[in-house]
Amino acid sequence: MPAEHSRSILGVAGEAMAQAADLIRVEFRLARAELAEKIGSLRTGAAFVVAGAVFLIGALFLLLQWAVVALVEAGLSAAMATFMVAMASCLIGLVLILAGRQKLDPSAVLPERTLNQIARDGAMAKEKLL
């Protein structure tokens, strides 16, 4: 009887290990799928940003020209008006770049749902084996 009991325990442990291995394989496939989804979303977002930037660059150039002309008509020399508009543009550009760099955090691409699920599955597997 003890031999049968030990075999059944070994069988159950072996089956649990096989199921854990299958679960890990499924979780890795899920992680890959989630990463692919997020990368696809990032690509789409980047394409929209680039397309929008192309139009905005043209519009910005025209607005900066308008600002220079307005300053010249207000009495400033063309050189001083151009310098003032260029410096203001540089300042705004630097602020935008610094703000944008904070949003480009690599952790935004992590498959959070899958990592959470793997942690839960690991805890459950430990609980079942112990």
Image: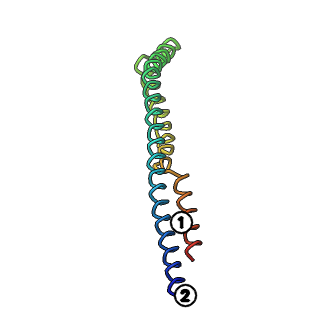
Point out the image quarter for the N terminus.
Answer: bottom right
Task: Name the residue carrying label 1.
Answer: 122
Instruction: Identify the element where label 1 is drawn.
Output: helix
80 or 54, which lies in front?
Answer: 54
Please tell me which residue is depicted at 47% across the width and 47% down the height of the picture: 109
Labelled disc at residue 13: none
14 or 2, which lies in front?
Answer: 2
Residue 113 image point, x, y percent: 55, 52
Task: Name the residue carrying label 2.
Answer: 1
Instruction: Identify the element where label 2 is drawn.
Output: loop
Residue 123 image point, x, y percent: 57, 67
Please say if the residues under marks 1 and 2 sit with CB atoms less than 8 Å apart: no
- Looking at the image, residue 69 lies above or below residue 2: above
Residue 130 image point, x, y percent: 57, 77
Mark 1 surroundings within 10 Å by alpha-carbon count, few (fewer than 14), some (14 through 19), many (20 or more): some
Q: How is the image coloured?
A: rainbow
- Looking at the image, residue 108 lies above or below residue 40: below
| Nearest to N terminus: mark 1 or mark 2 | 2
Please tell me which residue is depicted at 54% across the width and 66% down the height of the picture: 122
- Residue at the extreme bottom: 2
Mark 2 surroundings within 10 Å by alpha-carbon count, few (fewer than 14), some (14 through 19), many (20 or more): few
